[in-house]
Image (tube, helix red, strand yellow):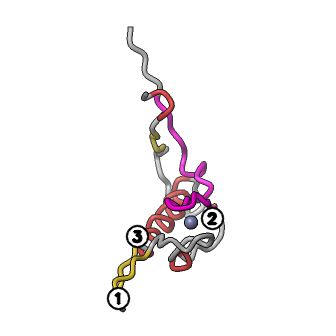
Amino acid sequence: MTTQTKRFIELSDLLGLRFECKECHASLFLPLSKVLIASRLRSCPHCNHPWLAVMNGQSGTSVYGDVSEVVDAVRKLASRFDGTLGFPVGCSMLVEVADKGSEK
Ligand SMILES: [Zn+2]
């Protein structure tokens, strides 16, 4: 017999984003209920290791916009599904997450 456990979360279960530095492992939690200014996550506040931006001389590239888009989309969708924005969504939406503890 094979059994399978699936794990789902509702968008309203998403409390915020947790960033962990790959260099020093310091972590930072930013709640979705507050304004997130992704450009302030340019580098680790503890060791200054680059986080969301990489500089190459005078120019650089970043993923600030991508992070902001995800945050905005999650907030908007959560409001749609909980009825806050008044759209009559006729279903629920859950996000399936990996159960990494049982995959080994
Ligand atoms: Zn760090």
Q: Within the image, what quadrant is residue 18 found in?
A: bottom right
In the rendered view, tell whether residue 104 sits above or below residue 11: above
Q: Which element type, helix, strand or loop, lies under badge 2?
A: strand
Mark 1 and mark 2 residues within 8 Å of each other at the beta carbon = no
Segment colored magenta:
6-28
Residue for badge 3: 66
Q: Earlier in the sequence, mark 1 or mark 2?
A: 2
Q: CA distance from mark 3 to mark 1?
A: 23 Å
Q: Which element type, helix, strand or loop, lies under badge 3?
A: helix
Residue 63 position, x and y percent, is 40, 72
What amino acid type is highlighted by mark number 3? Answer: Asp
What amino acid type is highlighted by mark number 1? Answer: Gly
Q: Is residue 27 left or right of residue 42?
A: right
Front one among 89 and 22: 22
Residue 19 position, x and y percent, is 55, 61
Mark drawn on residue 57 = 1
Residue 94 position, x and y percent, is 48, 43
Residue 51 is one of the magenta-drawn residues? no
Q: Earlier in the sequence, mark 3 or mark 1?
A: 1
Residue 76 position, x and y percent, is 51, 64
Mark drawn on residue 30 = 2
Q: CA distance from mark 1 to mark 2?
A: 30 Å
Residue located 50% across and 77% down the image:
42
Q: Residues within 10 Å of mark 1 (few under 14, many from 20)?
A: few
Question: Ligand 1 within 8 A of label 3's CB?
Answer: no
